[in-house]
Image (tube, rainbow, N blue to C red):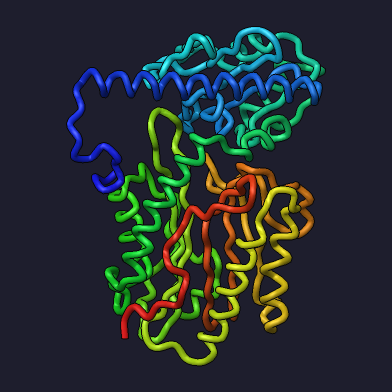
Amino acid sequence: MTLRDDPGAGVATSPDARATAEVSSRTGARAARAGRMARARAAMVERGVDVMLCSLGADLPWLTGYEAMPLERPTVLVLPVEGDATLVVPALEAPRVNEAPELFAMRPWLDGEDAVAIVAGLAGRPSRVAASDRCWAVLLLGFQRSLPGASWTTTSDVVGALRAVKDDAEIAALAAAGAAADRVAAALLAGEIALIGRTEAEVSTELGARLVAEGHAKVNFAIVGSGPNASSPHHEPGSRRIGPSETVVCDFGGTLHLGEDAGYCSDITRTVVTGEPGPEVRELYAVLERAQAAAVASVRPGLQCQEIDRVGRRIIAEAGYGEYFVHRIGHGIGLEEHEEPYIVEGSTTTIEAGHAFSVEPGIYLPGRLGARIEDIVVATDDGVRPLNLADHSLHVVEA
């Protein structure tokens, strides 16, 4: 967090006041997690799930505030539908856990112990088990051998819809991440980030460094596609040097921590031009800007996800670019860069207040040029709140 974002910047606070604020924040976060566990257990009852095994992925930090290291030593939250939850964690990582005995017990395990057997023993004899979507295959197969006769599902089937609806604290975290990304985008649009003559990889590195300088704990991605590479939506920035009179698609985001809670993600895309754009680029971009604005404006509770996709896609198709819009118009965001809800044709999921997701139409002319505009938005009781406010108009950054 920079000084200009800190509401207390320049205001003297006593150590006692700071300590009181920290305790209040910690208490609020733990109360929120207790509510999440209660809702998760209610969902388990509805789906006939006896126990959830949360390992890698976002379900673990959503429920506990602790994000496991993605190592070969497993960390697993064993959450039975009734009884105490237990966090099975490698002993050498246990000091990283902010203990919350009111939420879960700790079971550190030492190298040489069988973590799978420990988890299975805590799980009991379940009929149906939910395992994390990102649980490694070797771990899942070990669970299945140790819990014979159980049927299996994913934790997203249980808590995915719950996690998709953000509470006030989560929205505040997403807003802080979005504001930080906006400041980087503003620098790009203002021409403060040199482009012509630099490689895509060099610009990508600078975008990432600016995200960190603006408070992000880590960079999740920094796509830079220039000229013909701008027609590849997920282009890997490389050694190509950016030239004059090219569209440059910059899509970047990371994870920002606000308070004790786990980190929440940013994701923004802006397209700039390194010289006066010709009629083709101006026309294409005008269509794109209109489609993105209309899709954002359409967001409201009660609308199906696919209907938002249709709003933007219809405008692009009617302008003759339909075949060049090759991906869904958006994805959910939170603890993960991509999560529910997905804003795509075929999704009949109904938008609810608290759903946070991207709106990012793109037009890509293969081998020639491309453009994309992306904002994160949150559905509200009466409409939509954009979390990215960086200008959408086509900026010429180097004449």
Q: Quadrant of the C terminus?
A: bottom left
- Is 159 situated above or below 384? above
Q: Position of residue 283 (x, y in %)?
A: 56, 86
Horizontal arrangement in the rendering, residue 225 relative to residue 317 (left or right)? left
Residue at (71% x, 32% y) in the render: 154
Image quadrant assignment for residue 23: top left
Residue at (51% x, 85% y) in the render: 281
Please name whichever residue, 177 or 119, is drawn nearer the observer in this view of the structure.
177
Image quadrant assignment for residue 237: bottom left
Image quadrant assignment for residue 147: top right
Q: Position of residue 10 (x, y in %)?
A: 18, 39
Residue at (71% x, 30% y) in the render: 158
Q: Quadrant of the N terminus?
A: top left
- Is 225 situated above or below 319? above
Residue at (52% x, 80% y) in the render: 369
- Is 139 situated above or below 180? above
Please name whichever residue, 381 or 91, is drawn nearer the observer in this view of the structure.
381
